[in-house]
Image (spheres, rainbow, N blue to C red):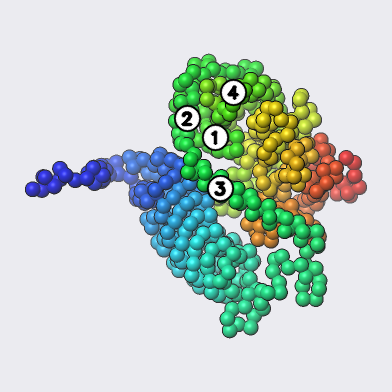
Amino acid sequence: MANCQMIHLRPWLASTLVLYMLLQNGGAISPDGEALLSFKNSIVGSDTVLSFWRPEDPDPCGWRGVTCDRITKRVVYLSLKDRRLSGPISADLGKLDRLRILALYNNNFYGNIPSDLGNCTELQGLYLQGNYLSGVIPNELGNLSQLQYLDVSSNSLSGSIPQSLGKLSKLVNFNVSNNFLMGPIPSEGSLTKFPDSSFAGNKGLCGKQINEACKNDNGPSNNSSGPLSALGQGGKKKYPARLLVSAFATIGALLLVALMCFWGCFLYKKFGRNESSSIAMDVSGGASIVMFHGDLPYSSKDIIKKLETLTEEHVIGCGGFGTVYKLAMDDGSEFALKRIVKMNEGFDRFFERELEILGSIKHRHLVNLRGYCNSPTSKLLIYDYLPGGSLDEVLHDVMPYTERSEQLDWDARLNIIVGAAKGLAYLHHDCSPRIIHRDIKSSNILLDGNLESRVSDFGLAKLLEDEESHITTIVAGTFGYLAPEYMQSGRATEKTDVYSFGVLVLEVLSGKRPTDASFIEKGLNIVGWLNYLASESRQQEIVDPHCEGLQAESLDALLSVAIRCVSSSPEDRPTMHRVVQLLESDVMTPCPSEFYDSNSE
């Protein structure tokens, strides 16, 4: 009878038993690996990143999104942001008791925040924002005595903010905004030092942090003041009128963009196709390799053979122009491969003509386009691979500030800014034909192993627009970096690039994205924030407080350059040649008095 029952076991149960018996043998994965596999098994949808987590591995240290201590092999970072992961968060993550960073933000997680995370007592950063988490904030999070960053904003959390969180004395960033929290904000402990933006979007909250009196409390009311209040009790203006108008305009634009992003993400998730085998499919139908100036010292056969092996595991980025893969040749050389799907019948002729131009452009601060693979379904652009990744990743990816500040001190930030300026100036003034980038942003500034910057994706915005049109029918670029006149007309000029570069400078200085949540709460973006600080002679407050080696004279000169670049009037913005001159003469070798007298261009 027992044998009959075993025969009729469901296949999945039999498979589970087999896996269990395998793990009981000498090759069992580490306990941290078991906890992560439990987390994986709770996921019901993803972008396939977890498909490469293999139970036969001795430990999870080689898995994507996982970083281990080199000596102990214990998991210290788990970073799976923007991976379209859906499902509950497994309570077994609480077994990762050496975990320092947990970053699961901008996914589709639902259910409760596991109280077991309170067992991860070495946790320094907990990032769960941008999901669909519900229930209460666990009281056990108050056990995380080392916690410095806690962000659970933009979820569906309810209940009150636990009093235990006030015991987290090391907190430097705290954000529970845009949930359904209610009740008094703890009035004692570390939560008293955070601004109202940390609690915004929770209509049921009250407390002195948001200037909202709780019931039976004689504290101040929120009816007469707030982040957008134009007048104080004595009639004194809090913001200049032009900034207030700009603030409301920004709010409208942000809401519009948020709505567009929501629908775009929804449609992509619902109808988007899996590209895990797309490269192999592209080249299997017949493909040819075009090399520029002998930049690819390989035969076409060898390159195509390598292309056929690329899978989702080799993806290193994804942007508006296509998915990017890492291509490693047998001799150890590495390249970045950008896949662009063909759009129409006339695509080939126009595309190849433009690529010939882009392949001829060589400059120290531009990413080198070495060639491309022409297939029936796509173009596969082959670029230099830069091991430092993108500036966006270095500025905003999850790592402790102590490590980031060592990497991005003042000199490093200046060097990155100057390099990006030189690359953009070359495109505008020195190459033939001149090129308007149209999408200057931190993710399009790549870094080599020495943090030298190079501008990438130049020419692609024009290349992918309508062949018959001189003005893009859809504005290229990324919200937050776009010049006001470009958003209105769709007409790109060199001065719209200058504006985007100015935003980039502010992003590097502050370490904040152009549309950081703290700006949005005030109805501003990073330019509006700078204007507000400048109106109160506090512009130096824009600098990342963790930036080491700051030089006041260089900062003053750099802020002056940035302010001119982001002027609302294109005529008042300097050319990129002039920007480079100012950076080299006044910022790298500061002479503020001479700079302030300079009004040319």
Question: As drawn, is 320 to the left or to the right of 459?
Answer: left
Q: Secondary structure at mark 4?
A: loop
Q: Residue at x 61, y 51 (%)?
A: 258
Q: Residue at x 47, y 36 (%)?
A: 273
**Label 3 sits on residue:** 263
Q: Amino acid at mark 3?
A: Trp
Q: Secondary structure at mark 1?
A: strand
Which image quadrant for residue 11? Answer: top left
Sequence order check, earlier mark of 3 and 2: 3
Question: As drawn, is 307 to the left or to the right of 569?
Answer: left
Frontmost residue, 391 versus 123: 391
Do the residues bearing badges 4 and 3 touch, measured as CB atoms within 8 Å? no
Do the residues bearing badges 3 and 1 touch, measured as CB atoms within 8 Å? no
The local crowd at label 2, few if under 14, some if 14 to 19, many if 20 or more residues have their Cα within 10 Å, is some
**Label 1 sits on residue:** 323
Q: Please determine whether, in this image, residue 174 is positioned above or below residue 432.
A: below
Q: Nearer the viewer, mark 3 or mark 2?
A: 3
Q: Give the distance between the C-alpha atoms of the residues marked 1 and 2, in whole angstroms.
A: 10 Å
Frontmost residue, 419 versus 264: 264
Sequence order check, earlier mark of 2 and 4: 2
Q: Amino acid at mark 2?
A: Ser
Q: Amino acid at mark 4?
A: Glu
The local crowd at label 3, few if under 14, some if 14 to 19, many if 20 or more residues have their Cα within 10 Å, is few
Question: As drawn, is 445 to the left or to the right of 178?
Answer: right
Q: Give the distance between the C-alpha atoms of the residues marked 4 and 3, in whole angstroms.
A: 28 Å
Sequence order check, earlier mark of 4 and 3: 3
Residue 91 in the image: state x and y as whole percent.
38, 58
Q: Give the distance between the C-alpha atoms of the residues marked 2 and 4, in whole angstroms.
A: 20 Å
Label number found at residue 278: 2
Label number found at residue 345: 4
Viewport quadrant of the C terminus: top right
